[in-house]
Amino acid sequence: MAATLVVSLWSAFFATRADWSSRRAIKRFDTMTKPVPNVIFTGQVAPGQAIELEIENLGGTLAAGGIIVHASDELYAGEVSLPEKASARRISLRFVVKAWKRQLEPQCLVLVGRDVSGRCYDYVDGGRRVKNPRRWLSSRLRELRMQGMVDFPSVTGKEKR
């Protein structure tokens, strides 16, 4: 009886250690494969024209992403995808709508990305994982009063109309 108890405690101890080790390994793997976009604003903003910026990926593959930028008194938006550890790539975002207030420095309002495994992250909030990207993006667009103006189907999984 005592031997059975000792063996079961011994196996429970090692099973717990194995579980902790596997969780740490999974967390390290997620950290290594998670995309880490870095946005650099370049040049001046011309009213009503597209804005150019450079975006690089310091982490894993960014399968799909969406970005909304507030520059001057206008909002710009676009989609982006980057390979793993990509150097800076110049992209242009199209003008969407006039903003409700003037911004002296360009600011990223929404930067959402999806990795190759389908997980989505909010990079404006420090890379926080988004559980339901469709609902999250809908609420962000509602906050910005941009419903129906912008959509990122590659991130949310909806097909283009």
Image (cartoon, rainbow, N blue to C red):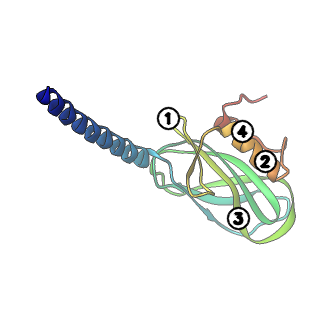
Furthest toward the front, the residue is: 1
Q: Which residue is mark 1?
A: 117
Q: Identify the mark at residue 135; answer none if there is no mark.
A: 4
Q: Earlier in the sequence, mark 4 or mark 2?
A: 4
Please state the horizontal and vertical placement of residue 59, each as a whole percent of the image.
Answer: 45, 51
Q: Badges 4 and 1: C-beta atoms under 8 Å apart?
A: no
In the image, residue 33 sits, relative to residue 75, either above or below, namely: above
Please state the horizontal and vertical placement of residue 144, each as a whole percent of the image.
Answer: 81, 53
Query: Label 1: how many residues lie within 10 Å, few (<14), some (14-19) or many (20+)?
Result: few
Between marks 2 and 3 in the image, the one whose residue lies nearer the viewer: 2
In the image, residue 34 sits, relative to residue 18, either above or below, namely: below
Give the amino acid at mark 2. Leu
The quarter of the displayed image where residue 153 is located: top right
Q: Badges 3 and 4: C-beta atoms under 8 Å apart?
A: no
**Residue found at x 54% / y 35%:** 118
Q: Earlier in the sequence, mark 4 or mark 1?
A: 1
Q: Which residue is mark 3?
A: 107
- Under circle 3, the secondary element is strand
Between marks 3 and 4 in the image, the one whose residue lies nearer the viewer: 4
Residues at marks 3 and 4, CA–CA distance in whole angstroms: 23 Å
Residues at marks 2 and 1, CA–CA distance in whole angstroms: 25 Å
Give the amino acid at mark 4. Arg
Residues at marks 3 and 1, CA–CA distance in whole angstroms: 28 Å
Residues at marks 2 and 3, CA–CA distance in whole angstroms: 16 Å
**Residue found at x 65% / y 60%:** 53
Please state the horizontal and vertical placement of residue 102, each as a whole percent of the image.
Answer: 84, 70
Is residue 134 left or right of 120 when viewed as pictured?
Answer: right
Query: Label 3: how many residues lie within 10 Å, few (<14), some (14-19) or many (20+)?
Result: some
- Under circle 4, the secondary element is helix
Q: Which residue is mark 2?
A: 141
